[in-house]
Amino acid sequence: MLNADLRPLARLPLLFLGMLSLLVGVLAGLARFGVALPLPVASQAGAHGALMISAFFGTVISLERAVALARGWAYLAPLAAGLGGLSLLLGMPLLLSQLLLGSAAAIMSLGSLLIARRQPALFTVTLALGALAWLAGNLFWLVDGVISSAVPWWMIFLVITIAGERLELTRFLPTPLLAKRLFAAIIVALLGGAALATQQALGLQVLAGGLLALAMWLLRYDIARRTIHQEGLTRFIAVCLLSGYGWLAWGAWLGLGGGFAPGDAQRDAALHSILLGFVLSMVFGHAPIIFPAVTKVRIPYHPFFYLPLLLLYLSLLLRVATDASAWRQAAGIGNALALLLFVLTMLVSVARGRRDTPL
Amino acid sequence: MSEIQQTTSPTALPGAEELRQTLRQALSQVIDPEAGMNIVDLGLIYRLEVTSEAVEVDITMTSPACPLGEMIIDQATAALRTALPAGLEVDMKLVWSPPWEPARMSDHAKVHFGW
């Protein structure tokens, strides 16, 4: 039974479990901006990063990987990550959440290593390294007890995972060997920077340099540069990608100036240019194909998809541009509304898909 | 599309080659949304064979880490069913060996992607 794939409908509860962490994680982020929220949510303010990255993204990325693996045991990863988030929300002992999230990352790492063994290639190894970065972040959180120790690892968990998936798609293009080597060197710089950052502040700058190089690499070699000339969903995805790379470059630039350091005035802007501007762009672009792949629910494209993306970028521009706390609070609310609009857009599209093609 | 194996089994129907063409046409309606290119030109169809009972297809994906496989297989199966004469079943298998490589793309796809 542990070897059999999970039916699409049975995957939905895992997705909802992850979305619960997303919901409270976003509200906890708003609480940090001083938005008045009920105590059960406001008390999660300190867990914002853990809920957003480890619990929410951990759940959905490990779910996506489990669908690709098509093995029952691989779904234990999103289950453990989702439960790890839930135990945070319920205020259970922190150690329990950390162990659940650590187990989730270990299972996903194992699955990703199996994929790399099945098809040894730079992109499969990159994906496995991304999973291991998640594991490293969870372990540092467990050992140090503070989230800031985990943040560089969690950030590169998302960035390396996305980079690996983009690299896979560049195989359609005649990418020079030198470019592939450069890509490998960038991944090493990201991992090395995160590792060094555990000892020295310089590590964060190495990490930022790696991120900037990666943004340039993706802008130069990603297939999106071609697919942006197509139409419909393919073009929308390309727009999300290319603009996301711009945000990655901007966040990395701020990081080079010291913006990743805890307590730095630019830390919020640096981290969220990457984690909202870059990572959420990838989510907005790919949800219309990944969500149907995971759940077998159709999401037909509509030009309206551009609206949440635009709202995200405008509110994020405000967030990185202003120092005034009132404006930053408004920007944070705008970020949350962009996400809400995106979820609503997806739900309306699901309804449209059902109406157009009765199954 | 020389990449697709030109096998005809002893039980092949008369007119099987025309049917193969029709089916290939049907499969080329299935697009990889990220690449913006159809699965036949991408070289994902390793084998397409028509027997008296079924059309047998071996299909691959460019990456074992990609969750889109199941959905593309469903779409490809649906596309074949619309073009299939009554009484024939679709027997589609996901294969990983040999792994996909860019050389499997059609000339059309290669030119499109700048090779």
Image (cartoon, coloured by chain):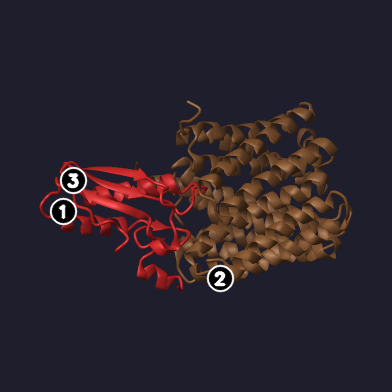
Q: Are marks 2 and 3 on the same chain?
A: no
Answer few, some or many: residues within 10 Å of disc 1's Cα (few below 14, many 20 plus, some between 14 and 19): some
Residue at the image point whose x is 88% and y is 56% from the top:
A201
In the rendered structure, the answer to whether residue A325 lies left or right of residue A92 reads: right
Judging from the image, mark 1 belongs to the subunit labelled B
Q: Residue A83, image x and y in percent?
A: 66, 30
Q: Which chain is red?
A: B
Q: Which residue is mark 1?
A: B16
Is residue A243 in view from this perspective? Answer: no
In the rendered structure, the answer to whether residue A98 lies left or right of residue A354 reads: right
Q: Residue A191, image x and y in percent?
A: 73, 53
Q: Residue A229, image x and y in percent?
A: 48, 72
The shade of chain A is brown
Task: Using the numbered discs, state the Cα–Cα distance from disc 2 to disc 3 in whole angstroms.
Answer: 43 Å
Judging from the image, mark 3 belongs to the subunit labelled B
Answer few, some or many: residues within 10 Å of disc 3's Cα (few below 14, many 20 plus, some between 14 and 19): some
Answer few, some or many: residues within 10 Å of disc 2's Cα (few below 14, many 20 plus, some between 14 and 19): few
Q: Which residue is mark 2?
A: A176
Question: Which of the pair A101/A351 is nearer the observer?
Answer: A101
What amino acid is at disc 2? Pro
Q: Secondary structure at mark 2?
A: loop
Residue at the image point whose x is 49% and y is 47% from the top:
B64
Residue at the image point whose x is 86% and y is 55% from the top:
A261
Task: Using the numbered discs, state the Cα–Cα distance from disc 1 to disc 3 in whole angstroms.
Answer: 8 Å
Is residue B72 in view from this perspective? Answer: yes
What amino acid is at disc 1? Ala
Q: Secondary structure at mark 1?
A: helix
Q: Quadrant of residue B15?
A: bottom left
Q: Secondary structure at mark 3?
A: loop
Judging from the image, mark 2 belongs to the subunit labelled A
Task: Using the numbered discs, state the Cα–Cα distance from disc 1 to disc 2 in whole angstroms.
Answer: 42 Å
Q: Which residue is mark 3?
A: B51
